[in-house]
């Protein structure tokens, strides 16, 4: 073998289709979630006969295919029939009744939303959706600020299935009784994948995303082992991409154990949420903190000139902290100091 045989040329890439590593990529098949998809489909099925469907509460840890399974069922439904309206909303991004209704209006093609109040938008949405049947996927529902909207959906939509997705199991139990008794959802729990399943999913993704045979076996195993340990496929996809990037940065034709190790140090032990999962408000706050790391919560709040109440701002900071996007240092008797996450600056 020549000295330069393993050097990647300028126009070569180790990636076949990098999009296959995006967190919101929906593959052709979703192994190990067949039963869950079936269950979701059964809740929706009555809508195809023009009857009302069942509501469903899906719950489970991050990165184990809840959103993916929902989007997969939605896609199958849309391919099968145009008779049932299917709407997917990420309630972290759209975290108020108003924003959710605006998004629904947007998805049903209603454009005259300007200057309309929340209740007016609800009336418009209900009138349109009640012409047929609708399945509403409300992902990240535990991040929503107001649950009144669920009450309205239960009361005002006639033939529907509400599919609610959350990390937090307790969210349902703490719901207002008025809402709970109307919702009466079926329950579906997603468990973490076992070692064999995780390895299977990862190897399948490698086939979609990389040129054949570029992965050294040890490097692949290291990435799989870490993914099994953290129990989150999203972290696994991150490691695959980072290892590939690291190999390319060194113009290597193979992804070797060193490249995988480099990716592992970046992942550390924390789990990344897709930054797209955060709402516009969270993004604004993160951008502000990135520019002003080291300021106190109070100082940061005043810089936003009343965009949020102090309470709301504090709650959002707490949420971002829980997701490792920020480091917050408590100072006894004073406003806490907020730093942009050290882990994020390494990306
Ligand atoms: N069975 C599977 N087959 C292929 N890819 C999978 C599978 N399960 C999960 N994934 C991939 O793992 C990533 C995380 O999955 P998903 O977004 O569905 O997680 P989630 O359970 O909704 O997590 P969160 O609670 O953080 O939103 C996605 O990129 C998804 O494509
Ligand atoms: Mg999700």
Image (cartoon, helix red, strand yellow):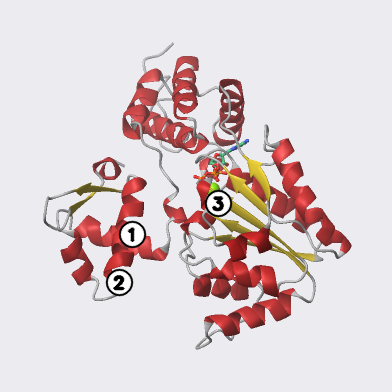
Q: Residue 347 at x, y = what percent?
A: 31, 42
Tell which of 129 and 235 is nearer to you: 129
Disc 2 target residue:
309
Secondary structure of the residue carrying tag 2 is loop
Mark 1 crowd level (few <14, some 14–19, many ≥20, 10 Å Cα): few
Which quadrant of the view contains residue 68? top right
Name the residue carrying label 3.
173
Rounded to the nearest angstrom, the CA distance separating label 3 from label 1 is 21 Å
Disc 3: CA contacts within 10 A as few (<14), some (14-19) or many (>=20):
few
Whether tag 2 and tag 3 are in contact, CB under 8 A, the answer is no
Is disc 3 placed on a helix, strand or loop?
A: helix
Residue beneath disc 1: 315
Is 117 situated above or below 186? below
**Can you tell which of label 2 and label 3 is closer to the viewer?**
3
Residue in front for this viewpoint, 183 or 292: 183
Neighbor class of circle 2 (other Cα within 10 Å; few <14, some 14-19, many 20+) is: few
Q: Residue at x 41, y 20 (%)?
A: 256
Residue at 33%, 31% in the rendered image: 268
Q: In percent of the image, x 60 and y 66: which residue is there?
A: 178
| Nearest to viewer (mark 3 / mark 1) | 3
Identify the residue at image location x=76%, y=52%: 43
Gap in Å between the C-alphas at discs 1 and 2?
Answer: 10 Å
Image side of residue 21 versus residue 83, left or right? left
Frontmost residue, 268 versus 6: 268
Q: Quadrant of residue 198?
A: top right
SS category of the residue bearing label 1: helix
Q: Is mark 1 within 8 Å of ligand 1?
A: no
Q: Earlier in the sequence, mark 3 or mark 1?
A: 3
**Residue 19 seen in render:** yes
Q: Is residue 254 visible?
A: no
Left or right, residue 259 beside residue 166 = left
Where is the N terminus found, in terms of image quarters? top left
């Amino acid at each position: 073998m020549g000295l330069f045989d393993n050097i990647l040329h300028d126009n070569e890439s180790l990636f076949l289709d990098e999009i296959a590593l995006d967190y919101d990529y929906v593959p052709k098949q979703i192994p190990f979630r067949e039963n869950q998809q079936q269950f979701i489909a059964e809740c929706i099925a009555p809508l195809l006969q023009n009857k009302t469907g069942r509501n469903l509460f899906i719950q489970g840890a991050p990165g184990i295919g809840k959103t993916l399974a929902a989007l997969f069922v939605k896609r199958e439904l849309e391919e099968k029939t145009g008779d049932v309206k299917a709407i997917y909303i990420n309630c972290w991004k759209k975290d108020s009744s108003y924003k959710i209704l605006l998004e629904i209006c947007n998805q049903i093609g209603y454009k005259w939303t300007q200057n309309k109040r929340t209740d007016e938008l609800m009336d418009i949405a209900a009138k349109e959706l009640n012409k047929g049947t609708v399945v509403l996927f409300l992902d990240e529902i535990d991040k929503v600020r107001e649950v009144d909207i669920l009450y309205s959906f239960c009361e005002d939509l006639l033939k529907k299935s509400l599919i609610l997705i959350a990390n937090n199991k307790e969210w349902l139990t703490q719901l207002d009784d008025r809402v709970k008794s109307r919702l009466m959802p079926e329950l579906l729990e997603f468990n973490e994948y076992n070692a064999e399943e995780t390895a299977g999913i990862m190897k399948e993704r490698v086939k979609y995303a990389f040129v054949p045979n570029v992965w050294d076996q040890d490097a692949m195993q290291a990435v799989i082992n870490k993914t099994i340990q953290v129990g989150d496929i999203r972290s696994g996809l991150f490691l695959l991409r980072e290892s590939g990037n690291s190999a390319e940065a060194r113009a290597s034709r193979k992804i070797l154990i060193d490249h995988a190790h480099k990716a592992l140090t970046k992942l550390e032990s924390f789990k990344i949420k897709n930054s797209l999962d955060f709402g516009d408000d969270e993004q604004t706050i993160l951008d502000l903190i990135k520019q002003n790391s080291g300021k106190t919560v109070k100082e940061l709040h005043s810089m936003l000139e009343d965009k949020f109440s102090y309470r709301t701002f504090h709650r959002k900071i707490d949420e971002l902290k829980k997701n490792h996007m920020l480091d917050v240092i408590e100072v006894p008797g004073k406003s806490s100091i907020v730093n942009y996450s050290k882990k994020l600056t390494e990306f």
